């Protein structure tokens, strides 16, 4: 009863007025909002303790402020309404939110729910989470409890144990989960049971929703003649909600309620996302707008500006993580050590991994690609679960200007491509993905790995 009253009060007194007002705002209104909320939070005692120099800065001045890569742990006297842990966007940490901080996130979620026509009108919601106290587990549970009439949340690591309960609590009009949890859920539950309404809202987060995974959502739900509406959310444990897709799943609209967003280019130029031109690509840098204001915090994600929505809010695409080292023991291939990332330099040329995934999705194959880079030349070994037509592969590659260079390099002899059909290998890799999901909660596992060698 108490939870229902709290929910009703927050909806009537806080969320409804906010959604009604902010949904009509244009770009100038949001800029004024960011300036005002920045000015408010830079004056708190916690911000003054951690970032005393912000007193002389305006929000606009942050274009010239330093970029921060270490998240400051909350001080002992910081109010704790909610607390969760991050498994490590940058490194493991504890995030603490005051009641006011949490309300800011709910405002952003509420406006997003309104934008996708799911504002308090979903009867049953399903959450597939990792484990508490990790951020996504807490956030998904709270959001579903608040925005759906009834909800059921279960850990991905216990779906075998709670299979009957998942089915019996349906049919679900909405589901929220992490991208990395989708395939185990599909194979264990959705392939066997009709648990969704005719047009469910599927909300994913945690990592980039690639074309191949997006296609898999529709293929699995097509078994039951369902037509899902899929939306990807860009969020992080440190700040909460940042951006989300409304129409196209990979085009995400910026939600400024709790974060300022900037982009750090390869030229080390920091640009307010409102001022960044279409096509600008770089690292996402956020200013976390709460009682302890954290300016210019680098997330390690590569984003590209795609334009603006009708209200003037920037639209971005999340391309993936910056280059990182990875070590995987793949059954059938052995120990693989290399690099993964959104854009990798191979034989002197940029390899756009998300664009490559789009090609493989069009070919409707599951895959693993190992690229051996010898600086002056490279070899692509492409493993797929079924045979692909090489002519069709190159036709799709040539359709994307970012990938056409590989056909040119092939003609020049700078690269070679080997195509191997190995369904068992791909199935073993999928099992490895599942195993690491269980062990690490939310791994960001690549389908393209680059190994460096000397000539």
Image: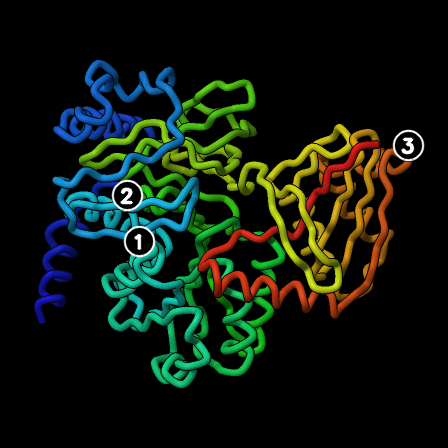
Sequence-earlier tag: 3 or 1: 1
Q: Which residue is mark 2?
A: 23
Label 1 Cα crowd, 10 Å radius (few <14 / some 14-19 / many 20+): some
Q: Which residue is mark 3?
A: 412
**Distance from label 1 to label 2 (Cα)?**
9 Å
**Distance from label 3 to label 1 (Cα)?**
53 Å
At 34% from the left and 41% from the top, the residue drawn is 255
Secondary structure beneath dot 2 equals loop
**Distance from label 3 to label 2 (Cα)?**
53 Å
Q: Are marks 1 and 2 in contact (CB under 8 Å)?
A: yes
Sequence-earlier tag: 1 or 2: 2
Apparent side of residue 95 relative to residue 178 in the rendered image (left or right): left
Secondary structure beneath dot 1 equals helix
Task: Report whether residue 248 is seen.
Answer: no
At 52% from the left and 49% from the top, the residue drawn is 208
Q: Which residue is mark 1?
A: 114
Q: Position of residue 446 (x, y in %)?
A: 61, 51
Secondary structure beneath dot 3 equals helix
Label 3 Cα crowd, 10 Å radius (few <14 / some 14-19 / many 20+): few
Q: Nearer the viewer, mark 3 or mark 1?
A: 3
* Label number found at residue 326: none
Q: Position of residue 151 (x, y in %)?
A: 29, 71
Q: Position of residue 171 (x, y in %)?
A: 38, 78
**Is 90 in front, or is 389?**
90
Location of residue 288 (image quadrant): top left
Residue 87, placed above or below residue 374: below
Task: Report whether residue 41 is seen.
Answer: yes
């Amino acid at each position: 009863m108490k939870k229902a009253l709290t929910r009703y009060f927050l909806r009537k007194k806080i969320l409804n007025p906010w959604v009604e007002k902010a949904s009509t705002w244009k770009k100038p209104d949001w800029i004024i909002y960011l300036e005002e909320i920045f000015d408010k939070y830079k004056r708190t005692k916690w911000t003054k303790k951690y970032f005393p120099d912000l007193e002389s800065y305006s929000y606009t001045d942050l274009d010239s402020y330093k970029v921060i890569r270490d998240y400051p742990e909350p001080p002992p006297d910081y109010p704790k309404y909610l607390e969760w842990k991050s498994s490590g966007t940058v490194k493991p940490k504890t995030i603490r939110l005051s009641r006011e901080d949490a309300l800011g996130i709910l405002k952003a979620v509420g406006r997003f729910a309104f934008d996708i026509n799911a504002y308090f009108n979903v009867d049953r919601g399903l959450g597939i989470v990792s484990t508490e106290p990790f951020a996504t587990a807490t956030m998904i549970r709270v959001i579903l409890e608040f925005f759906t009439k009834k909800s059921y949340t279960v850990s991905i690591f216990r779906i075998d144990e709670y299979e009957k309960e998942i089915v019996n609590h349906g049919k679900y009009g909405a589901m929220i989960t992490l991208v990395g949890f989708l395939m185990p859920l599909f194979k264990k539950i959705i392939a066997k049971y009709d648990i969704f309404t005719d047009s469910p809202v599927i909300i994913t987060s945690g990592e980039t929703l690639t074309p191949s995974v997006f296609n898999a959502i529709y293929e699995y739900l097509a078994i039951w003649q369902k037509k899902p509406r899929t939306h990807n959310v860009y969020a992080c444990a440190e700040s909460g909600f940042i951006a989300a897709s409304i129409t196209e799943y990979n085009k995400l609209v910026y939600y400024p309620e709790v974060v300022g967003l900037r982009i750090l280019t390869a030229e080390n130029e920091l640009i307010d996302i409102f001022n960044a031109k279409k096509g600008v690509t770089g690292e996402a840098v956020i200013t976390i707008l709460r009682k302890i204001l954290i300016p210019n915090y680098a997330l390690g994600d590569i984003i590209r500006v795609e334009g603006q929505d009708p209200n003037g809010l920037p639209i971005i695409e999340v391309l993936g993580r910056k280059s990182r080292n990875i070590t995987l023991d793949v059954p059938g291939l052995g120990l693989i050590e290399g690099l993964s990332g959104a854009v990798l330099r191979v034989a002197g040329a940029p390899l756009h991994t998300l664009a490559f995934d789009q090609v493989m999705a069009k070919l409707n194959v599951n895959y693993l690609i190992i690229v051996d880079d010898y600086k002056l030349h490279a070899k692509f070994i492409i493993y797929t679960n079924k045979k692909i037509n090489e002519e069709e592969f190159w036709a799709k590659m040539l359709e994307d200007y970012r990938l056409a260079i590989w056909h040119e390099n092939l003609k020049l002899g700078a690269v070679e491509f080997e195509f191997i059909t190995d369904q068992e290998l791909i199935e073993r890799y999928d099992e490895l993905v599942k195993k690491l999901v269980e062990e690490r909660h939310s791994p960001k596992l690549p389908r393209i790995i680059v190994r460096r060698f000397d000539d």
